Structures are given as C-alpha cells and as structure tokens.
Image (cartoon, grey):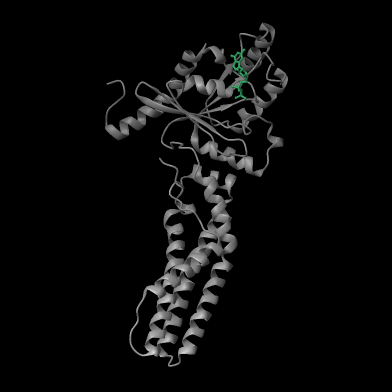
Amino acid sequence: MKNPFEKMPTVLFADELIDKAFRRAEKAASAATPRGKPLYKAREREELRIRTVSQVLRDNLKKILDRTPGVSTLPPFYRELLDTLVDRNTFHRSLASINWAIKTLKTLEDRYVEKIRYSRDTNEISKLRRQFYGRAASIIKDIGDNLEYLNKARNVLKDLPVIDLNLPTIVIAGHPNVGKSTLLRQLTNAKPEVASYPFTTKGINVGQFEEHWLKYQVIDTPGLLDRPLSERNEIERQAILALKHLGKVIIYIFDPSEYCGYPVGDQMHLFKEIYEEFREFPFIVVLNKTDIADEEKIQKVESFLRGMRIEPIRIIAKEGEGIEELKKRLIEIIKPEMEAIVLRNTGRSLDG
Ligand code: GDP
C-alpha cells in the first residue's frame, strides 16, 4: 500500500489562486479576436474572461479534491494517523468547503454570463464582469483558511513513510536509549528501508526484513511508547491507537545496564503500563546490553518477568547477539497468521 496522500497537489493560497485565474483570463482575452459590432465584441471578450476565471479556479480546486483521499476511504491506521498529524475533522471540513466553492463559482459564472448576454450596454457589460471578478475573489477568500490548512497538511502528509498495511508489523517499545533503533537496524539488516517523518514531533522508523519468503515490518516510534501513560496527551493516545490497528507483536526492550539513564525499577514500571495498554498483543521481551549490564540487575528483571510468566531473551543488539533467537520467536508467533493469509490467497500451505 502506498502513502494515500502521495498524489495530493500543491495547494495555492487564496491570493495566489485568484492572481493565477485573473492572469490567465487576461491572457485569453488579449489573444481573442472578436469581430462585429462593439457590443458583440464586448460581450464576447467579457464572457471569455468570466468563463476563464471560473474554469481556472474550479480546475485548481477540483484537482485538490480528486487527488486527496476522503477521510472515510482511509484505512483505520491512516485515519488515526491523520488525527495525530493534522486533525481529521478540520481536514474533512476543509475539503467540504472546497466542494462548496466549486459549486458556488459555477452558479455565479452561469448567472453573470447570462446577464451579459442580455445586456445591450458595453459599459454595463464591463461593470458586470468586474462584479463577477469581485464575487469570485471573495468566494476564494472565504475558503482562504481552508486552503492554507490543506497546504500545510499536504506538506506533512506527502512525506508519510511507506508503511505496508498488509505486512505483519512488529512494534518496538521501551525507554529512550535502551537500544530500540539499534535493534531495528539489526532486525532489518538485509534491507534497511528506514524512513523518518514528523510523528508526534519525533519521527517514526520503519524497516522491513524477509524470512522464509515472507516480509515483515518493524517500526519504532520514538516518544510514543517510552513514557508512562500519565504523561501522554490526547494526540499521543491517538497515535497509540494507530499502532494498535497496525501491530501484530510488541517487542519490549529492557536495558538492565541502566546506561540508558533509567533505573530498572522505572523500566519495570513502564513495562507494566505498556503490557496493560497492549494486553491483546503477544509480547516478546528482550534484555539488551547484556555485555555491559550487571548480572544482578539482569536477574532482577528476569525474576520480575517470570513472575508475569514471561521468558525474556538476552541480547546484545549492538553486536547482533541473540537476534536469531529473537527472529525465531517472532516468526513462531506471526507465522500461523501468515499461513492463514497465504492459504487464503493461493490455496497452498507454506510448508507444502
Ligand atoms: P533508542 O533510543 O532506544 O533507539 O536507543 P539506541 O538504539 O539509539 O541506543 C542507545 C545507545 O545504546 C547507543 O549508543 C547504542 O550504541 C547503545 N547500545 C545499543 N545496544 C547496545 C548493546 O547491546 N550493548 C551496548 N554496550 N550498547 C548498546
């Protein structure tokens, strides 16, 4: 699945759009060579100006609508993401206002062209045209805030990383500096396609790896799953919801060396929260930096986890140690589901 906002066009500001339309109308009018009586010439020229202004404005607006996915057509993950980045209601209202402007312009255009056709006075004809210009400009100014909003939204949305909604996705969690991005790089070593974009102001890392001809996706969301719940705001909660639509497994990282700056007590506390928050997900817990951690701290975390019936894996992410075992465990969890998908799509089982 591609980024659904990839094709969104640049959105001009109200003034830019009005200028563009007027300029094009002048160009069209000066290129035209109407013939006949002055009255006919005036009619023809002013009608051309009105039609051109309206056409340019409507075409530009329509392009925005055509190339921007409607909120209701988005997969749930992108809908939640839209909220974290730009607020989906404002986004939806802005698109609706553009639709309104297109219709209103067309009605106005037809009304003024008709008036001009019935007029027998060249002065009145150019006055009508000026009136139309004024009213068309004010329609665009009315939606000026919406255009500005969509312009900004587009700049954020066009750079969303390619997150494949069909791939089984592994979400990495744990305090800052415990080794999340190091692990992501290790897991996705074969094909590092790491992208970043403003996600709750910090960026998101996405990588993929292939195992047994199946692709997996690993994501790390700095700033999101690395703090207690009470410190999260509404937007971050929304982002967590987005992760829930996407994720299949959570890898939780402990750093028993405490070099990350968080005592293991804090880490156990955060783990409990995330475990509770994502209780419907399978978890794999790793103890990282076992090359520099005290055995006593390692065992403290291990016995805490065993109390919750969780068997952690010791790793050294920096050296790639324990990664194979971790992958094996990931596949054990994800494979049954993948098999069901492959079976459904091809009628064949993975092993046969
Ligand atoms: P993140 O903030 O959770 O993504 O953490 P990083 O992946 O950026 O790692 C933080 C620091 O820990 C970096 O300096 C890493 O090199 C270091 N680090 C990561 N894994 C290990 C490990 O297994 N052993 C040691 N000694 N250092 C590690």
Does the rendering let one see residue 314? no
Q: Residue at x 50, y 38 (%)?
A: 245
Residue 193 % position (x, y): 46, 29
Quadrant where the image shows the N terminus: top left
Q: Nearer the viewer, residue 297 or 352?
A: 297
User: Viewed as shown, does residue 344 lie left or right of 230?
Assistant: left
Residue under the point 39% across and 89% down: 38
Q: Which of 299 and 135 is in front in this view?
A: 135
Specify the quadrant that holds the C terminus: top left
In the depicted structure, whether residue 321 falls above or below residue 134? above
Q: Quadrant of residue 91?
A: bottom right
Please tell me in which quarter of the rendered image ligand 1 is found.
top right
Q: Residue furthest top?
A: 295
Q: In this view, does 172 lie to the left or right of 265?
A: left
The spot of residue 293 in percent (x, y) is 66, 10
**Camera-side residue of 33 and 50:** 33
Q: Nearer the viewer, residue 51 or 19?
A: 19
Relative to 219, residue 95 above or below = below
Q: Can residue 237 be seen in this view?
A: yes
Q: Residue furthest bottom?
A: 120
**On the rendered structure, is 302 left or right of 243?**
right
Q: Which residue is drawn at 37% across and 73% down?
A: 31
Residue 152, placed above or below residue 335: below
